[in-house]
Amino acid sequence: VIRGVVFDMDGVLTDTLEFHYQTWQRLADEENIPFDRKANEALRGLSRRDSLMAILGDRMLGEAIVEEMLDRKNRYFLEFIQTMTQDHLLPGVLDLLQELRSDGIRIAIASASQNVDLVTRQLGLTDWVDAITNVYNVPHPKPAPDVFLYAAEQIGLPPHQCIAIEDAESGVKAALDARMWVVGLGPQERVGAAHVILSNLNSVRWKDLLDKIQCCR
Ligand code: G16
Ligand code: MG
Protein backbone atom coordinates (compact mmCIF):
# COMPACT_ATOMS: atom_id res chain seq x y z
CA VAL A 1 0.00 0.00 0.00
CA ILE A 2 1.03 3.56 -0.73
CA ARG A 3 0.97 5.75 2.37
CA GLY A 4 3.09 8.74 1.43
CA VAL A 5 3.83 11.16 -1.38
CA VAL A 6 7.15 12.94 -1.71
CA PHE A 7 7.03 16.01 -3.92
CA ASP A 8 9.96 17.61 -5.65
CA MET A 9 9.56 21.38 -5.41
CA ASP A 10 10.88 23.31 -8.42
CA GLY A 11 9.00 22.17 -11.51
CA VAL A 12 6.40 20.15 -9.56
CA LEU A 13 4.85 22.41 -6.92
CA THR A 14 5.94 25.67 -8.51
CA ASP A 15 7.76 26.82 -11.58
CA THR A 16 10.91 28.55 -10.44
CA LEU A 17 12.82 27.47 -13.55
CA GLU A 18 12.31 30.92 -15.11
CA PHE A 19 13.64 32.61 -11.94
CA HIS A 20 16.65 30.30 -11.93
CA TYR A 21 17.18 31.01 -15.62
CA GLN A 22 17.07 34.80 -15.22
CA THR A 23 19.45 34.79 -12.26
CA TRP A 24 21.98 32.46 -13.91
CA GLN A 25 21.76 34.59 -17.07
CA ARG A 26 22.47 37.74 -15.06
CA LEU A 27 25.50 36.14 -13.42
CA ALA A 28 26.78 34.70 -16.70
CA ASP A 29 26.43 38.10 -18.41
CA GLU A 30 28.34 39.79 -15.61
CA GLU A 31 31.10 37.23 -15.98
CA ASN A 32 31.06 37.19 -19.80
CA ILE A 33 30.28 33.49 -19.88
CA PRO A 34 28.07 32.30 -22.76
CA PHE A 35 24.68 31.10 -21.49
CA ASP A 36 21.12 30.87 -22.79
CA ARG A 37 17.72 29.27 -22.15
CA LYS A 38 18.76 26.05 -23.80
CA ALA A 39 21.81 25.73 -21.54
CA ASN A 40 19.56 26.45 -18.56
CA GLU A 41 17.30 23.51 -19.40
CA ALA A 42 20.21 21.15 -18.63
CA LEU A 43 20.39 22.55 -15.08
CA ARG A 44 16.90 21.38 -14.09
CA GLY A 45 17.05 19.59 -10.74
CA LEU A 46 20.80 20.10 -10.26
CA SER A 47 22.06 21.65 -7.04
CA ARG A 48 23.25 25.25 -7.15
CA ARG A 49 26.90 24.25 -7.10
CA ASP A 50 26.50 21.56 -9.77
CA SER A 51 24.63 24.11 -11.89
CA LEU A 52 27.48 26.62 -11.63
CA MET A 53 30.02 23.91 -12.47
CA ALA A 54 28.04 23.08 -15.61
CA ILE A 55 27.93 26.76 -16.61
CA LEU A 56 31.66 27.23 -16.00
CA GLY A 57 32.55 24.15 -18.06
CA ASP A 58 36.35 23.86 -18.17
CA ARG A 59 36.97 27.32 -16.68
CA MET A 60 38.97 26.68 -13.53
CA LEU A 61 38.25 29.10 -10.70
CA GLY A 62 39.38 29.22 -7.08
CA GLU A 63 36.99 28.17 -4.32
CA ALA A 64 36.60 31.71 -2.97
CA ILE A 65 35.51 32.99 -6.39
CA VAL A 66 33.11 30.08 -6.82
CA GLU A 67 31.59 30.77 -3.38
CA GLU A 68 31.13 34.44 -4.22
CA MET A 69 29.35 33.56 -7.47
CA LEU A 70 27.05 31.09 -5.69
CA ASP A 71 26.16 33.75 -3.12
CA ARG A 72 25.58 36.38 -5.77
CA LYS A 73 23.34 34.06 -7.78
CA ASN A 74 21.31 33.31 -4.69
CA ARG A 75 20.97 37.00 -3.82
CA TYR A 76 19.44 37.62 -7.23
CA PHE A 77 17.23 34.55 -6.85
CA LEU A 78 15.97 35.69 -3.42
CA GLU A 79 14.74 38.94 -5.02
CA PHE A 80 12.40 36.82 -7.14
CA ILE A 81 11.35 34.58 -4.26
CA GLN A 82 10.17 37.58 -2.22
CA THR A 83 7.54 38.19 -4.91
CA MET A 84 6.14 34.64 -4.74
CA THR A 85 2.67 33.90 -3.36
CA GLN A 86 0.17 31.04 -3.47
CA ASP A 87 -0.56 32.18 -7.05
CA HIS A 88 2.76 30.61 -8.02
CA LEU A 89 1.54 27.09 -7.22
CA LEU A 90 1.26 25.04 -10.39
CA PRO A 91 -2.26 24.02 -11.50
CA GLY A 92 -3.68 20.97 -9.72
CA VAL A 93 -1.29 21.03 -6.77
CA LEU A 94 -3.69 22.33 -4.11
CA ASP A 95 -6.50 19.96 -5.15
CA LEU A 96 -4.15 17.00 -4.97
CA LEU A 97 -2.79 18.03 -1.57
CA GLN A 98 -6.36 18.35 -0.32
CA GLU A 99 -7.18 14.83 -1.48
CA LEU A 100 -4.02 13.42 0.07
CA ARG A 101 -4.81 15.08 3.36
CA SER A 102 -8.34 13.72 3.54
CA ASP A 103 -7.04 10.24 2.68
CA GLY A 104 -4.50 10.38 5.51
CA ILE A 105 -1.55 10.18 3.11
CA ARG A 106 1.69 11.58 4.53
CA ILE A 107 3.25 14.39 2.53
CA ALA A 108 6.89 15.43 2.18
CA ILE A 109 8.90 17.79 0.00
CA ALA A 110 12.34 16.64 -1.17
CA SER A 111 14.18 19.39 -3.00
CA ALA A 112 17.67 20.15 -4.25
CA SER A 113 17.02 23.77 -3.29
CA GLN A 114 18.57 25.31 -0.20
CA ASN A 115 15.68 27.76 -0.34
CA VAL A 116 13.03 25.07 0.03
CA ASP A 117 11.77 26.24 3.46
CA LEU A 118 11.42 29.82 2.29
CA VAL A 119 9.69 28.91 -0.98
CA THR A 120 7.34 26.51 0.83
CA ARG A 121 6.38 29.35 3.15
CA GLN A 122 5.88 31.84 0.30
CA LEU A 123 3.60 29.31 -1.41
CA GLY A 124 1.56 28.91 1.79
CA LEU A 125 2.29 25.17 1.95
CA THR A 126 4.03 24.91 5.31
CA ASP A 127 0.94 23.57 7.10
CA TRP A 128 0.20 21.15 4.28
CA VAL A 129 3.33 19.07 4.56
CA ASP A 130 4.63 16.69 7.22
CA ALA A 131 8.32 17.06 6.31
CA ILE A 132 10.60 19.23 4.21
CA THR A 133 14.05 17.96 3.27
CA ASN A 134 16.81 19.59 1.30
CA VAL A 135 20.47 19.19 0.44
CA TYR A 136 21.56 20.45 3.86
CA ASN A 137 20.05 17.33 5.44
CA VAL A 138 21.97 14.78 3.37
CA PRO A 139 25.51 14.09 2.14
CA HIS A 140 24.82 13.82 -1.61
CA PRO A 141 22.51 15.87 -3.87
CA LYS A 142 20.23 14.36 -6.55
CA PRO A 143 20.83 12.20 -8.62
CA ALA A 144 21.90 10.39 -5.42
CA PRO A 145 18.87 8.88 -3.61
CA ASP A 146 19.76 10.48 -0.26
CA VAL A 147 17.20 13.27 -0.18
CA PHE A 148 14.33 10.86 -0.96
CA LEU A 149 15.51 8.29 1.58
CA TYR A 150 15.69 11.03 4.19
CA ALA A 151 12.22 12.28 3.30
CA ALA A 152 10.76 8.76 3.71
CA GLU A 153 12.45 8.46 7.09
CA GLN A 154 11.05 11.84 8.13
CA ILE A 155 7.48 10.74 7.41
CA GLY A 156 8.13 7.33 8.98
CA LEU A 157 7.55 5.15 5.90
CA PRO A 158 9.64 2.66 3.93
CA PRO A 159 10.41 4.09 0.45
CA HIS A 160 8.34 1.41 -1.35
CA GLN A 161 5.23 2.80 0.37
CA CYS A 162 5.90 6.23 -1.14
CA ILE A 163 5.28 7.85 -4.50
CA ALA A 164 7.81 10.47 -5.60
CA ILE A 165 6.74 13.17 -8.06
CA GLU A 166 9.63 14.66 -10.07
CA ASP A 167 10.21 16.81 -13.15
CA ALA A 168 13.96 16.33 -13.63
CA GLU A 169 15.97 13.45 -15.03
CA SER A 170 18.35 13.62 -12.06
CA GLY A 171 15.40 13.59 -9.64
CA VAL A 172 13.70 10.63 -11.32
CA LYS A 173 16.94 8.69 -11.02
CA ALA A 174 17.31 9.68 -7.36
CA ALA A 175 13.77 8.53 -6.51
CA LEU A 176 14.09 5.26 -8.45
CA ASP A 177 17.37 4.49 -6.68
CA ALA A 178 15.58 5.19 -3.39
CA ARG A 179 13.12 2.45 -4.50
CA MET A 180 10.07 4.68 -4.55
CA TRP A 181 7.25 4.58 -7.08
CA VAL A 182 8.02 7.44 -9.41
CA VAL A 183 5.73 9.78 -11.30
CA GLY A 184 7.62 11.87 -13.87
CA LEU A 185 6.21 15.21 -15.04
CA GLY A 186 7.34 16.27 -18.49
CA PRO A 187 8.47 14.86 -21.82
CA GLN A 188 9.55 11.25 -22.33
CA GLU A 189 13.13 12.35 -23.16
CA ARG A 190 13.43 13.86 -19.70
CA VAL A 191 11.39 11.70 -17.31
CA GLY A 192 10.99 8.52 -19.40
CA ALA A 193 12.59 6.34 -16.71
CA ALA A 194 9.69 7.00 -14.28
CA HIS A 195 6.98 4.35 -13.64
CA VAL A 196 4.22 6.76 -14.69
CA ILE A 197 4.61 9.77 -16.98
CA LEU A 198 2.26 12.78 -16.94
CA SER A 199 2.60 16.21 -18.52
CA ASN A 200 1.70 18.02 -15.27
CA LEU A 201 -0.56 17.71 -12.18
CA ASN A 202 -3.45 19.68 -13.64
CA SER A 203 -6.73 17.78 -12.92
CA VAL A 204 -4.82 14.75 -11.67
CA ARG A 205 -6.92 12.89 -9.08
CA TRP A 206 -5.32 10.85 -6.32
CA LYS A 207 -7.34 7.75 -7.19
CA ASP A 208 -6.26 7.87 -10.85
CA LEU A 209 -2.65 8.26 -9.83
CA LEU A 210 -2.92 5.23 -7.52
CA ASP A 211 -4.55 3.19 -10.30
CA LYS A 212 -1.73 4.05 -12.67
CA ILE A 213 0.91 3.03 -10.13
CA GLN A 214 -1.05 -0.16 -9.36
CA CYS A 215 -0.81 -1.10 -13.05
CA CYS A 216 2.98 -1.20 -13.09
CA ARG A 217 3.41 -3.21 -9.88
C1 G16 B 1 15.86 22.98 -7.60
C2 G16 B 1 15.95 23.30 -9.11
C3 G16 B 1 17.34 23.50 -9.60
C4 G16 B 1 18.14 24.38 -8.66
C5 G16 B 1 18.18 23.72 -7.29
C6 G16 B 1 19.00 24.52 -6.28
O1 G16 B 1 15.64 21.70 -7.25
O2 G16 B 1 15.31 22.34 -9.90
O3 G16 B 1 17.30 24.06 -10.90
O4 G16 B 1 19.46 24.60 -9.15
O5 G16 B 1 16.87 23.55 -6.80
O6 G16 B 1 18.31 25.64 -5.84
P1 G16 B 1 18.89 26.70 -4.81
O7 G16 B 1 19.83 27.59 -5.57
O8 G16 B 1 17.64 27.42 -4.33
O9 G16 B 1 19.60 25.95 -3.72
P2 G16 B 1 14.29 20.77 -7.08
O10 G16 B 1 14.93 19.52 -6.57
O11 G16 B 1 13.30 21.38 -6.08
O12 G16 B 1 13.71 20.67 -8.46
MG1 MG C 1 12.44 19.76 -9.90
Image (tube, rainbow, N blue to C red):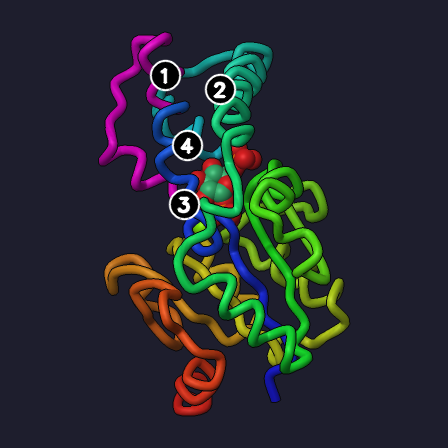
Mark found first going from the N terminus, 3 or 1: 3
Q: Nearer the viewer, residue 143 or 131?
A: 131
Whether residue 38 is in magenta: the answer is yes
Q: CA distance from mark 4 to mark 3?
A: 10 Å
Q: Which residue is mark 4?
A: 20
Q: Are marks 4 and 2 in contact (CB under 8 Å)?
A: no
Mark found first going from the N terminus, 4 or 3: 3
Q: Where does residue 21 sit, x and y in percent of width and height?
A: 35, 30
Picture residue at 61% right of the left edge, 61% below the top: 148
Which numbered disc, 4 or 3, marks the residue closer to the eye?
3
Left or right: where 214 falls relative to 162? left
Mark found first going from the N terminus, 4 or 2: 4
Question: Label 4 neighbourhood size at 10 Å, few (<14), some (14-19), many (20+)?
Answer: many
Question: Regarding mark 1 in the picture, which secondary structure is present there?
Answer: helix
Q: Which residue is mark 3?
A: 15
Residue 149 visible at all: yes
Residue 161 is labelled as none
The part of the chain drawn in magenta is 24-45
Whether residue 182 is in magenta: the answer is no
